[in-house]
Amino acid sequence: MSAPLPWLEAPLQQALRQRAHALLFHGPAGVGQYEFGFELAKALLCEAGGEGAHRPCGRCPSCHLMDTHGHPDFKLLMPEALREPLGWPEEESRKKDAKPSKWIRIEEVRQAIDWSHQSVSRGVAKVLLIHPATAMQEASANALLKTLEEPAPQVRLLLTATDPELLLPTIRSRCQRLALPMPPREAALAWLQERGVAQPAVLLDAAGGRPLEAQALAGEGVDAAAWAALPQRLRLGDVTAVAQWPLPRLLETLLKLCHDLMAVAAGGAPRYFPADALPSGAALPALAQWSRELTQLSRHDEHPWNASLLAESLVAQAAALWPAARPAAGARPRVTTLGR
Ligand SMILES: [Zn+2]
């Protein structure tokens, strides 16, 4: 069988050769850090090949236990907010009315450390995957230090990070590092096509070249036509185009649109939208101001905004970039004062 993400095949071989007891792998979001960690864990625990195996066999009892998320020698630490998107059931202890946490809790880290000291169940290894390691706050990260330095025999620790510089230096220095590459465009397009994504080139551009993000867009019902139509709909102030979107996705998309409009206004090429999908006429100074406001807002997307009001306001703000398109354009709404 081939690796689920072909562009990660070479790093997988490298990681299996390195046999580090603590491995930190990092790379841009949306290239498959979790998938890489899971596949590596599966390979390390696979009972078919033993030492020197190149990839998990996919058939042995251990591979089967991994696939059904029931392997006793595999533990995954990740924020509650990532469980459902990555296909893991909610923790039973979670309060149903609470917002899923973005952090890995210190009790979970302590439990994982205790688990790492218990003996191996199936006799091959024990693998702890922490995704992403940057979701551990300082106390949690400190709790892990001793285990990182001297893990119990047969224990392997796998840590992911988009930006390893955000980790405590004491964590970084205790891990071997492995950079995950951006996939070559052709490989990413072929992979998306295999998964039934129509016109994958448009969505791959929309996702900045990150295939898993392109797949997520497609999964949310954003197809190539909808993406290409978006700038025009925003120009007309059509809030229904984005009404169902989570706020972070909307902000990110507006930042991409702003980037492309600025690039084109400055005589360059767009990166995220097809060139012919971008309405002309927005002025560079207004775009620069918009970019600053969006950037500032996107840093605060966890605030308890009234999301639908904010979305409306953001769309009105976008539409105001093209004054001619709006018959009775008034003062440009200020979004930064809403919902505080
Ligand atoms: Zn196997």
Image (tube, rainbow, N blue to C red):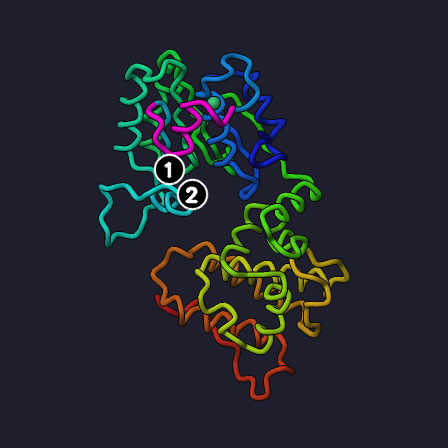
Task: Report which residue position mark 1 lands on.
Answer: 78
For the image, the number of numbered tags is 2
Disc 1 element: loop
Q: Is residue 174 visible?
A: no
Region in magenta: 57-72
Task: Report which residue position mark 2 lands on.
Answer: 86
Q: Quadrant of the C terminus?
A: bottom left
As for residue 69 lying within the magenta part, the answer is yes
Quadrant of res 226: bottom right
Q: Are marks 1 and 2 in contact (CB under 8 Å)?
A: yes
Report the front residue among 23 and 73.
Answer: 73
Q: Give residue 120's position: percent from left, percent from top.
A: 33, 16
Q: Amino acid at mark 2?
A: Leu
Within 10 Å of the Cα at label 1, are there few (<14), some (14-19), or many (20+) other Cα atoms? many
As for residue 95 lying within the magenta part, the answer is no
Q: Give residue 85's position: percent from left, percent from top.
A: 42, 47
For the residue with label 2, is its CB less than 8 Å from the closest atom of ligand 1?
Answer: no
For the residue with label 1, is its CB less than 8 Å from the closest atom of ligand 1?
Answer: no
Q: Amino acid at mark 1?
A: Met
Residue positioned 43% across, 36% down in the render: 132
- Asked whether, in this view, residue 264 is left or right of residue 105, the answer is right
Q: Give residue 326's position: percent from left, percent from top.
A: 59, 83
Disc 2 element: loop
Name the mark on residue 278: none
Q: Quadrant of the N terminus?
A: top right
Residue positioned 35% across, 33% down in the render: 138
- Above/below status of 332 relative to 219: below
Within 10 Å of the Cα at label 2, are there few (<14), some (14-19), or many (20+) other Cα atoms? few
- Above/below status of 118 relative to 40: above
Q: Is residue 214 visible?
A: yes
